[in-house]
Image (cartoon, rainbow, N blue to C red):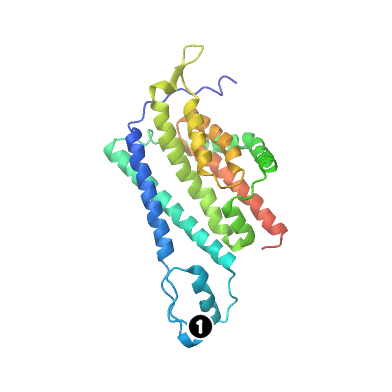
Amino acid sequence: MASLLDREPAPPVPWRGFDLLVITGMYLLLQIVAAWAVSNGAPAVVVPPEIVGQQELPAGDVEVSAWPVAALRNEPQPSRGEANAYLSMKYMAAGSVASLATMIAAIIYLRLLRRATWSDLGLRSPDAWRDILIGVGTFAVVAVPIFTLHAIANLLLAPQQGHPIIEAVVRYPHFFWLSLVTAVIIAPITEEFFFRGLLLGWLNSLPTARETDARGRPQLAWWPVVLTSAGFAMLHLGHGAAPVALFFFSMVLGWLFQRYHRLLPCIALHAALNGTSMLMLAAELFRRGAW
């Protein structure tokens, strides 16, 4: 057991807290731009006044503009709930693109201005297949405890609101494939880069994060993992009882990064968890006859 908990320090990363604030500013700015593009991107719909009694409908208003267009085409008119779900999916897709853009901008910033290496960023994997197997193997060990904890948290907390994306897909199954790409590919890559690669990588470099074990060997402290896990759980507030299980799941991800100092095992583990959740959702859709 002691060997499994060994987490020897890597060389300190070259970025500092100020750089993380800059990258956070990039992220917020791009998210705002993405949301603005969604809310203002739809063109105005012009309909003859004698048909609907008005000259022009507000630009970008999915709830209003969907009905006249459907009526003119003699198509079934969408419900307001479906229009809202469609808009939520557009925001989700735009937010995912903004996250990827921030990740790319952060890599360029740190490589050029801080001379960060690929190893510093956790993006160097000499044996990619081995790293993927490490992540998948870790998932095989922790999957049952994590899903059990999530079920218990749901039972005890009885949240009024579940995960917004899952609720939208359950009501409107045709959104499943967009959610699958976001949950299994984009979210694991971007979230692991920001939380494990940048934040935990910086915290691990602080002097207080470096300890010595009973045998006199250098080890990394646990508090950076706890701190990043708290932030990771807070990111998922509003997703029902998910933050409870995700805090402990993030602890595993933090241990994995401290042990190997590479992001690919963490991305593989994260993708395996999200992929299993999406498979369970797909099974539920089949059971309901939605497909």
| Res 142 quadrant in image | top right
- In the displayed structure image, the side of residue 191 where residue 21 appears, left or right: left
Q: Residue at x 64, y 46 (%)?
A: 159
Residue 3 location in percent, x, y? 55, 21
From the viewer's side, name the closer residue of 291 and 194. 194
Residue 71 visible at all = yes
237 shown above or below 214 = below
Direction bottom: furthest residue: 50
Q: Secondary structure at mark 1?
A: helix
89 shown above or below 68 = above
Q: Residue at x 51, y 40 (%)?
A: 234
- In the displayed structure image, the side of residue 72 where residue 121 appears, left or right: left
Residue 227 location in percent, x, y? 48, 31
Residue 290 location in percent, x, y? 67, 63
The C terminus sits in image quarter: bottom right
The N terminus sits in image quarter: top right
Amino acid carrying mark 1 in the image:
Val
Residue for badge 1: 52
| Res 5 quadrant in image | top right
244 shown above or below 288 = above
Q: Residue at x 69, y 55 (%)?
A: 284
